[in-house]
Every structure is written in C-alpha cells, then in structure tokens.
Amino acid sequence: MLHSAIFNTVKTGESAKNFKRLAPTISAVFQPWVNWPLKMRAFYKNTFRVPTFNDLYYTRVGNTKLRPEVAQQYNLGLTYIASTGNLFKKVSVTTDVYHNNVTDKIVAVPRENLFQWSMQNLGKVKINGLDLTTFAQLEEWKQWRFEVYINYSYQRALDQSDATSVLFNKQIAYTPLHSGSFRFSAQRSKVSLSYNMLWSGSRYRIGEEIPENYLPSWATHDLNLRYNWEKSGFKYEVFAEANNILNRQYEIIIYYPMPRFSWRIGAKVGL
C-alpha cells in the first residue's frame, strides 16, 4: 500500500492542485512444478501518474489544470528460464497479458498548428496488450560470447471518453498496434559489437482513421563497436556508431522527419 501526498505552490501565476491518494497493489508468484523452470505470476494495481513539472508549467505546453492519470491494472504472466546446453547456454522467455482501465490519461496534443502542443487529459482509455520477450545466451565460440534479445508488443488502446465522438473506440493518437525490437551482441575480452533494430507499426496522429492522419510503419537498424580497457586506475572506452544504416526516411510525429543515416565516434574516460 502506497500513500502519496503532493503539494504545489508557485510565486506567480496559477498553481496546480494538491494531490493525495492511496495506491494498493496485490501480487502473487507461483511455480507449478518444482523440477520445471516455469513461473506464473499475477498482479492487480491501482496506480496513478501525477503530471510532471514540464506537463504543468512548461511555456505554452504546460497545463496547470491537468489531473493525475489513474489506472486499474490487471496482469498475468509466465516466465521460463532454462540452461539448455548445446547451442544455447541460457534461454529466458517472458510473456505478459494485461488489461488497463485508465482515467484522465495524460497526452500531448497539437493546438492551432503542429508547432504548438499542449498537455491534456483524455477522459477514459481501455488498454489490452501482450508483451513477449525472449533472451538467449549462446555457448562461447573461440572466446566470443553472444547474446540475442527479441521483444514484441501488442497494444490496443481505445479512447472511450465520449460515445458520441468520432474518436470513440478508436486507437489513441500515435499508438501503434504492433511494435518490437531485436538486439544481437558479441563480446570478446575488451571488444564488443552489437546490432540493434527498432520497429513500430503504423498508427494515426489522432484517433480518426482517415488517410490524412495515417503514419506508416518504420524500422531502424544500428551498429555499434566499443573497446574498453583500464589503466592506472582509470577506465577508458573508444566507440563507433552507425545509426539508421539503411538510410530510411521515417516520422514518429507527423511532419517531423527523423535523421537518416548518421555516424558517431568518441572516447570516454572515467574512474
């Protein structure tokens, strides 16, 4: 049981309201078979997210009338961790299905034009989702250690604020139904290499599903090389990165194109 009390004061202008709330949580973990590395878990949470300082007060974006976002969260999950031998030294598979009822969800929406945004509360949102994560550690090969990480997410987040609105029961703005990531890394002694892929499915800038609001899916592919060593009590690192190596044009927010291919090299020194 968590109790939070937040008080807001300002020297000039309008202050956000004070906030007090209890947030109960119930959770359980169960292993059905002692000799099989499978665990089941479940939880219920009555959670909240208060607006951040920027949400409330940032110039032309903040909104001091924002209410805290409140959610009823239900989750069921499975975790399987095993050492299989042969090709895979360790394998972990995690699956979660969840249902959230959210009231006063805090979102950023455009105002008169796309260059002016403001924070608003979205009355009611119903969210159903699935998260699937797989991690594998491969057997060493000539002193190289390999790891693979895969994640997939399905999230249907429907606006249920106003049954008379064209946005009712539509996916909320900028929320893809499908998304995922992939990472492969290799490490030997002081050298590490990695490949990363991020992918997002198509979505709409607002809930109304018309061609003018449509944003296509996108994916980025990045490469990373690092070399680390220690000397005289200091830690050194040199690195090289190549981002969006396929030079794809994509937008996360409509009319705001993201960088195409870019590269970076650098060095770090620390204690």
Image: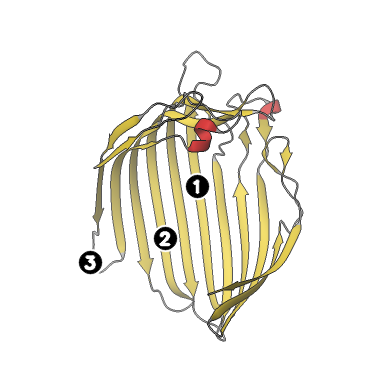
Residue 271's place in the image compared with 199, above or below, is below
- Most foreground residue, 46 or 162: 46
Q: Depth check: give the residue in front, 55 or 96.
A: 55
Residue identified by numbered label 2: 93
Say what secondary structure mark 1 lies in: strand
Where disc 3 sits, the SS reads: loop
Q: Amino acid at mark 1?
A: Ser
Dot 1 or dot 2, earlier in sequence: 2
Point out which mark residue 103 bears: none
Tell me how far mark 3 sits from mark 1, CA to CA.
30 Å
Residue 108, percent from left and from top: 56, 31
Q: Which residue is mark 1?
A: 153
Q: Which residue is mark 3?
A: 34
> Element at badge 2?
strand
- Please state which amino acid type lies under the numbered disc 3: Val
Determine the residue positioned at 76% across, 56% down: 261
Q: Nearer the viewer, residue 188 or 63?
A: 63
Q: Estimate how packed mark 2 is, as few (under 14), some (14 to 19) or many (20 or more) residues with alpha carbons within 10 Å.
A: some
Mark earlier in primary sequence (3, 1): 3
Image: 214 above or below 76: above
